[in-house]
């Protein structure tokens, strides 16, 4: 029986990179996002070309009703879930200094990146526990996509940094709670990846990368993150629950 992976924000950027690698490794997929089904047709077609089943579950992870809807669509279609990849996330609409940034932006970013991922993880975890109790051979795994911003301070997007630092602790909390069920929980922490999210700051990062910001002197690609996630999902790191996998070209190694 094929294993089922739910990838939030899986129709573009890093999420599509992850979904593509999971499809290439034989997973059936549930792809979530907020755009209409018509807008993601090409991505779904691309993922189906691997010969797997792929469904699109439209809904916002930022709302309780959205999270309920996403999980119930996966239940209705597949009746099981092996992998949750909490990838969907947003940057602040405007990068503002923490001395001026607004509560509205804080709420928006935290509701999606932290609250959304945290409570979707809670739902998936409870379902995985149920599946494990019914079938000892069940194999589940949760992977959270955080960011180097979990530990690197950027004062022009404090709310984003806080959301990713929180997601990092959420990974540890669920790793602890799900240990007894042998359901590993991982954090994948990307560096600077070329996607729509970073399109507005491309020139700035082009320059910094050329000047040696990363040890590996190039932008990260969605595929780089996808390959790391697929490796975790396949079970290559089964005795490493709670760990952080860096995908940042060495950016965060302190240097003198
Ligand atoms: P993009 O902006 O390219 O894509 C974001 C994805 O998240 C989209 O698919 C979008 O859906 C989805 N999404 C946004 N809000 C919601 C929501 N409320 N409910 C469901 N889905 C939602 O971002 P990236 O691919 O660059 O980023 C993906 C993840 O990686 C994020 O968590 C980001 O913080 C993290 N990250 C990114 C880095 C980078 O350099 N790009 C670096 C480190 C971490 P839709 O397509 O329907 O609009």
Image: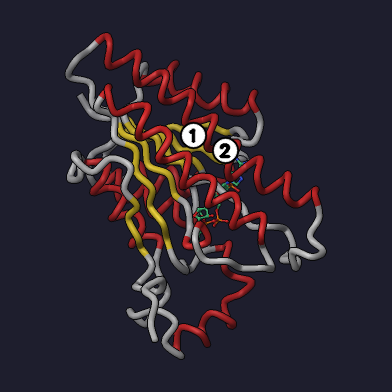
**Left or right side of 137 for 206:** right
Above/below status of 46 relative to 140? below
The residue that mark 2 highlights is 37
Q: Secondary structure at mark 1?
A: strand
Q: What is the x, y in percent for residue 5? A: 35, 34
Against 206, residue 21 (above or below) is: above
Can you say whether 8 is above or below 72 in the image?
Answer: below
Instruction: Report the residue at 75% width, 52% height from top.
Output: 105
Which residue corresponds to the image point at 47% horizontal and 69% vertical from the top-left? 192
**Residue furthest out toward the bottom:** 211
Res 191 → quadrant: bottom left
**For this view, does 133 lie left or right of residue 43?**
left
Of the image marks 1 and 2, the number of the one nearer the N terminus = 2
Mark 1 Cα within 10 Å, few/some/many (few <14, many 20+)?
many
Colour scheme of the picture:
secondary structure
Kindly report the distance in space between the C-alpha atoms of the residues bearing marks 1 and 2. Answer: 7 Å
Left or right side of 70 for 249:
left
Counting other residues with Cα less than 10 Å from the Cα at mark 2, is it few (<14), some (14-19), or many (20 or more)? some
Residue 232: x and y, percent?
A: 26, 45
Helix, strand, or loop for circle 2?
helix
Residue at 27% across, 47% down: 230
Residue with the mark numbered 1: 56
Q: For the C terminus, which image quadrant? A: bottom left
The quadrant holding residue 157 is bottom right
| Looking at the image, residue 46 lies above or below residue 57 | below
**Total residue callouts:** 2
The quarter of the picture where the N terminus appears is: top left
Q: Are marks 1 and 2 in contact (CB under 8 Å)?
A: yes
Is the shortest distance between ligand 1 and the CB of mark 1 under 8 Å? no
């Amino acid at each position: 029986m094929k294993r089922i992976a739910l990838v939030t924000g899986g129709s573009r950027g890093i999420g599509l990179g992850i979904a593509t690698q999971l499809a290439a490794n034989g997973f059936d997929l549930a792809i979530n996002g907020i755009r209409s089904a018509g807008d993601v047709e090409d991505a779904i077609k691309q993922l189906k070309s691997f010969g797997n089943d792929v469904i699109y579950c439209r809904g916002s992870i930022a709302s309780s009703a959205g999270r309920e809807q996403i999980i119930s669509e996966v239940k209705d279609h597949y009746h099981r879930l092996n992998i949750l990849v909490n990838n969907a996330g947003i940057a602040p609409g405007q990068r503002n200094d923490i001395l001026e940034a607004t509560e509205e932006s804080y709420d928006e970013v935290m509701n999606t990146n932290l609250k959304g991922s945290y409570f979707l993880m809670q739902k998936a975890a409870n379902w995985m526990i149920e599946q494990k109790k019914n079938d000892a051979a069940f194999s589940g795994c949760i992977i959270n996509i955080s960011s180097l911003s979990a530990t690197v301070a950027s004062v022009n997007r404090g709310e984003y940094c806080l959301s990713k630092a929180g997601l990092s602790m959420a990974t540890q909390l669920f790793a602890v709670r799900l240990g007894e069920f042998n359901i590993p929980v991982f954090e994948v922490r990307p560096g600077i990846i070329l996607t729509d999210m970073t399109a507005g700051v491309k020139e700035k990062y082009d320059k910094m990368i050329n000047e040696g910001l990363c040890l590996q002197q190039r932008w990260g690609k969605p595929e780089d993150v996808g390959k790391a996630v697929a490796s975790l999902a396949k079970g290559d790191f089964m005795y490493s629950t709670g760990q952080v996998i860096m995908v940042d070209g060495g950016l965060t190694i302190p240097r003198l």
